[in-house]
Amino acid sequence: MWMTGRRKGRKRVEPHFGPRAPDLRADPEDRFVASKSAKRRSRRDADHEEEAPRPRKSGRKSARSTPRRRSLIARIAYWSVVAGVWSVIGFTVLFAYHASKLPPIDQLAVPKRPPNIAILSADGALVANRGDTGGAAIHLAELPAYTPKAFIAIEDRRFYSHWGLDPLGILRAIARNVTRRGGMEGGSTLTQQLAKNLFLTQERTFSRKIQEAILALWLEHRYSKDQILELYLNRVYFGSGAYGIEAAANRYFAHSARNITLSESAMLAGLMKAPSKLAPSRNPDAAAERAAQVVTAMAQEGFVTEKMAQIALANPAHAVHDQGAGSINYAADYIMDALDDTVGAIDQDIVVSTTLDPAVQSAAEKALTDELDKKGQKFGVTQGAVVALDLDGAIRALVGGRNYAESQFNRAVSAKRQPGSAFKPFVYLTALEAGLTPDTVREDGPINLKGWQPENYSREYFGPVSLTKGLALSLNTVAVRLGVEVGPKAVAKIAHRLGISSDLQANASIALGTSEVTPLELVTAYAPFANGGVGVQPHIILKVRSADGKLLYQRKGSSNGRIVEPQYVAMMNTMMQETLLTGTARKAELPGWQAAGKTGTSQDFRDAWFVGYTSHLIAGVWLGNDDNSPTKHVSGGNLPVEIWSRLMREAHKGVQVATLPSGTWRATPLPPVAPPGLDILRSLLPASPPREAAPPVPVANARPQAPADNHDAAPVNLKQAAEAAARYPLPQASIPTTRRRDALLPPDDIPGGDAPTERGYLRERGFFEKLFGG
């Protein structure tokens, strides 16, 4: 019987190709033997393969090598993808970490720009900027079209195409830095630079660069390209303390960025690489070279035509003289102080219109600096101040020192110094209001007030002289007699009424100007003599407006009203004109104008003054040293008068000539009065020198010292003085009727210079030559 299927107990033989695999169902020992047999067959087959001849090479690639190469490329692609994924994850984590160090996005905002104070002169010209930025903000539309393109060409050529970060720019910068081509270069975009300026410090760390990139992306999302560019141009640093393009244009080129030229735009754009190093005021050659690179880049990008580029390269920009050291900065500082009382806290850009006259300011600065440069070393004087006022108190010029860059201390408004004989007009005005006239006679002779014995510089005495002559020749004994006669308190009251705000020591030495005052208040106090008797308030601010034109403050016409009667103004002008004609200010020159004034010199020539005026302007000059050291015989009658004359000649050019206020006081002279106190006064003030000088009477706690001044009372030719005295008749002397005996006496404590002894020091001529020298 035929059996279907396999025969029981027999194995089916399967076809086999190659080494036989061991039967896993067999006995373990059999499997081991089979395994060894398979290995032997494998080695035998391998040997046969080695002995077999190799195929000949042909021009075609082996079919077996193609998969291998494809496998290699696949592996590279695979691992590149893996590396890219992990890089993205790493950078995401890194960005997230550094982003966590920043404020939340919903709280992020562009910091408000610090306010700028633009200061304009009386004619509307910009004279200074104050504020942290050094200049006002400006809109992109107000700039010439080529100006922002200059920054794009040299700093970020793909500004309008990237989204805050420029990978191509970064790669280019890396390549150039590696190959050392063109020097080290950064890959930051304008947006990144703006982010750094707005939010971050200037430190160069990897963490800061990551934050810069994050903030650049936020800026691009929040603002348009033009807004970003406008923010950039108004915030970036241009060197020399200038933040923003408007500040930089004014600092380097002395005009607004609205009027900037192509070559100037290129120079400012070139500063971005190294603002301090390339500042045109500091390194003009390097700045010009960098500007040429900017112009070339603009031409390559098609921002300017070839002809425009050639013109710009042929005419490079040049920085003007550094305006930061000009004397106008003294006035600007004074304006900033005055703004606190005018508009209070400033939280926006403002424009301040002032009373400053650029021509007068420039003339005052030049006159002072030229005189000190020429004669300062010879005369041992290092500093000075000049103030010029209009008849209504408007400040036309204010120079607070020789050089603002070297010293910002404003001597015109802050330095208090002894005015010397420049204070005497207030003594004489007090005497006039008490009933005296310019023709009133007083004795010019030695005087002894409780051990204090002031004398004239020349040690000459003219005997009976008119008040006009006494003031013109700055005779100390006459001034002291008048001061004692009317009372020191009355003199101080008159001085305060006219404009002196400093404290005054009401003692006998006040007549010689021993109480300290500032140049501004002394010049202010002379204004009533020039304007007919009206008290003025010195002022420099006229209007304050916001940047958009809103009026914040406007000065209204105001004065202190009439404080000196017209007849006394006329008398004072008559006497002080004589100072310039025959007195101590004979060197003053102002052709065609009627001028008056008074010189002043303090003890040991420490301070030298001249305050003079016309019907157009009042000006005062002070010279001295900051450490209060004596000068080498600088008196009010020499250098200050020369400076004043130079200033006034410039300030009066083109001005219609006018006379000083005058009156008819000569037609109705006041009758002489012989008050009961005249005998007491004569007993205290001898009319003629005694034959033998009696020693002074000792007084408890008395300090008999010689106070300041008389150095401006230079020796006068007796013939010339007689001619001057003959110009006026000398009526009988008169004094006020209501003076108590104690009002005629000086106080016990009379301040002044150091005296060697209480007795007999007047006999030591060498001491007084030092004390009251020429």
Image: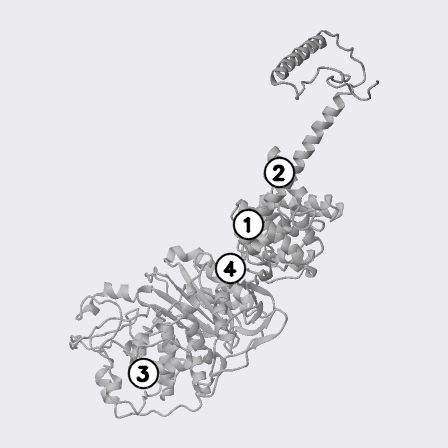
Q: Nearer the viewer, mark 1 or mark 2?
A: 1
User: In the rendered view, would you say 648 is above or below 9?
Assistant: below
Q: CA distance from mark 3 to mark 1?
A: 76 Å
Disc with the residue nearer the chain's start (3 vs 2): 2
Q: Report x, y in % for residue 336.
A: 49, 68
The kind of residue on which mark 3 rests is Lys
Going by the picture, which residue comes out furthest to the front? 1
CA separation, marks 1 and 4? 50 Å
Residue placed under numbered mark 2 in the picture: 174
Residue 434: give x, y in percent of width and height.
Answer: 35, 88
Residue 384's spot in the image, x, y percent? 42, 63
Q: What amino acid is at disc 1?
A: Tyr
Of the 4 image quadrants, the one containing the N terminus is top right
Which numbered disc, 2 or 4, marks the residue that appears first in the sequence? 2
Q: Which circle, 1 or 4, is nearer the viewer?
A: 1
Q: Which residue is mark 4?
A: 326
Q: Position of residue 767 (x, y in %)?
A: 24, 64
Q: Nearer the viewer, mark 3 or mark 1?
A: 1
Q: Earlier in the sequence, mark 3 or mark 1?
A: 1
* Residue type beneath disc 2: Ile
Report helix, strand or loop for mark 1.
helix
Comes first in the chain, label 4 or label 3: 4
What residue is at 78 percent from the left and 12 percent from the top?
A: 57
Q: Nearer the viewer, residue 38 or 194?
A: 38
Residue beneath label 1, please?
97
Is there any visible trace of residue 543 in the rendered image? Answer: yes
Q: From this viewpoint, is residue 279 visible?
A: no
